[in-house]
Image (cartoon, grey):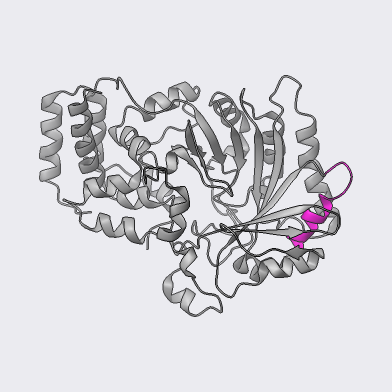
């Protein structure tokens, strides 16, 4: 089973292999790319924390329920660098997500909602399990705090909307029930709050009646599913969208555990079936350039992520072991320039991880199996590049393509040394 992103991040700082050192030396020797992908980020997801007190049994990040015993940097301690970087990205949408549960850091979330900006910013979204809605008073206090932060955004900032997206499915309901989600939805029906967006994202499971239970708790009527979506029609006239995604059988979940549960994985929840929603007209699925929401949107810019430790990543678009950090980066211009010095970033942003799997297959045949079997659209790059030899080989192969296309120049001796290093490796991917 692949390690969680949290564990991967910890491992990355514990040492650098000779193959990764060789890869970095090769990258440093290259001229700047004359052509590469977009330099704006249409969407960016921020993890205020990698902690989640809910502890769902299907969490693909295997987020710890508490970080109290760990001493580590977190962007929640210092929001300034995150906001400075994001405000230069050119965003359409800014999202508080995880990782962990964003609302374990409510003060960070409020400041983010109030200050995040870009000229074309249309929406600010909070993704939450609604665990904070333990009772009516706490629900009101936390939601009102977020809405007040949104309403008091300075006049010179973009007039972005604000949406609360609630994660709720069978696994969430086993831990906290449907009532926290219902409390948030009821509250947003009050006067002065109806302009706050709200929808539910669930996991598509056979035998899961959680959405029906939520509809009953709200006194609403539920439509049949169409394109992974259902709607709860509430007595007050509101329509609450429920959008279903595929179950990710990684992290805390595996096929054996799933086989013991009263829910199942239907055909529509398989990654190869669900992933068809995100293909372009040419049959390509490039997550770095796609918004994976109720309405799929192929982006002009990039889809990015800032993890709770400050790492800046392009979703499925760069080697996660080579990412800039908000603490050591002056601004977005510097961050994207660093990312595009790597042939892997240039290739992944153009083509996506499925094509990278094909490129790796002659040396690492299991890459094709990974691409076929990985039950998560946004995790394949981590699997393909999990080992130093895979990273070095992928760099050399993508560089070959870019050299032939005339997009970059390389020192021939540096390339030869990198191939020699790969050929002499002692560890296998």
Identify the residue at horizontal 77%, vertical 35% (top origin): 149
Left or right: 151 as drawn, with respect to 366: right
Q: Is residue 222 left or right of residue 375?
A: right
- Residue 169 appears in the picture as rendered: yes
Q: Residue at x 20, y 39 (%)?
A: 397
In the displayed structure, does residue 201 sit left or right of residue 182? left
Quadrant in the picture for the C terminus: bottom left
Q: Nearer the viewer, residue 49 or 174?
A: 174
Count the labels in the image.
0
Q: Which residues are magenta?
A: 179-193
* Residue 252 in view, yes or no: no
**Where is 265 relative to 95, above or below?**
below
Question: Would you identify the image quadrant in which residue 409 lies?
Answer: top left
Above or below, comparing residue 359 to residue 87 in the picture: below
The one nearer the camera, 257 or 108, is 257
Front residue of 397 and 285: 285
Classify 53 as above or below 282: below
At a point 46% along the width and 27% down the height, the residue shown is 328
Residue 426: where, in percent of width, then height?
15, 51
Is residue 407 part of the magenta span, yes or no?
Answer: no
Residue 258 location (% of width, % of height): 48, 74
Magenta stretch holds residue 189: yes
**What residue occupies the far right of the structure in this picture?**
191
Residue 280: horizontal and vertical position, in percent? Answer: 42, 43
Quarter placement of the N terminus:
bottom left
* Predominant SS of the magenta segment: helix
Image point (25%, 20%), residue name: 31
């Amino acid at each position: 089973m692949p390690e969680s992103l949290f564990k991967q991040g910890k491992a990355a700082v514990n040492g650098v292999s000779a193959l990764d050192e060789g890869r970095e030396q090769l990258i440093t020797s290259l001229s700047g790319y004359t052509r590469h992908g977009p330099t704006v980020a249409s969407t960016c997801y921020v993890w205020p924390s990698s902690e989640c007190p809910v502890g769902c049994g299907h969490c693909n990040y295997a987020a710890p329920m508490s970080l109290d015993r760990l001493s580590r940097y977190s962007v929640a301690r210092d929001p300034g660098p995150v906001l400075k970087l994001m405000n230069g990205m050119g965003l359409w949408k800014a999202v508080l997500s995880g990782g962990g549960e964003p609302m374990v850091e409510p003060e960070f979330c409020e400041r983010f909602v109030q200050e995040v900006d870009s000229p074309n910013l249309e929406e600010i979204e909070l993704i939450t399990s609604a665990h904070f809605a333990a009772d009516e008073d706490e629900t009101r206090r936390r939601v009102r705090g977020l809405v007040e932060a949104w309403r008091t955004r300075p006049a010179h900032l973009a007039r972005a909307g604000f949406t609360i997206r609630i994660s709720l499915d069978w696994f969430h309901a086993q831990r906290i029930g449907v009532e926290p989600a219902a409390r948030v939805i009821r509250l947003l029906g009050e006067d002065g709050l109806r302009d706050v967006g709200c929808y539910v994202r669930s996991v598509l499971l056979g035998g899961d009646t959680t959405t029906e239970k939520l509809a009953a708790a709200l006194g609403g009527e539920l439509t049949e599913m169409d394109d992974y979506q259902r709607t709860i029609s509430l007595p007050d006239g509101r329509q609450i969208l429920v959008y279903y995604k595929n179950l990710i059988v990684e992290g805390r979940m595996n096929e054996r555990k799933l086989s013991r549960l009263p829910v199942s994985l239907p055909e529509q929840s398989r990654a190869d079936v669900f992933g068809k929603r995100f293909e372009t007209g040419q049959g390509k699925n490039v997550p770095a350039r796609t918004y994976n929401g109720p309405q799929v949107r192929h982006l002009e810019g990039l889809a990015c992520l800032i993890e709770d430790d400050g790492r800046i990543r392009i979703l499925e678009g760069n080697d996660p072991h080579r990412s800039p950090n908000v603490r050591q980066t002056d601004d977005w211009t510097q961050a994207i320039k660093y990312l595009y010095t790597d042939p892997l970033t240039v290739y992944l942003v153009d083509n996506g991880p499925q094509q990278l799997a094909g490129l790796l297959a002659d040396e690492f045949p299991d890459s094709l199996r990974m691409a076929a079997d990985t039950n998560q659209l946004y995790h394949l790059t981590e699997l393909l590049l999990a080992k130093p030899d895979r990273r070095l080989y992928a760099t050399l192969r993508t560089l070959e393509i870019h050299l032939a296309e005339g997009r970059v120049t390389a020192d021939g001796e540096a390339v030869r040394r990198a191939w020699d290093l790969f050929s002499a490796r002692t560890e296998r991917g």
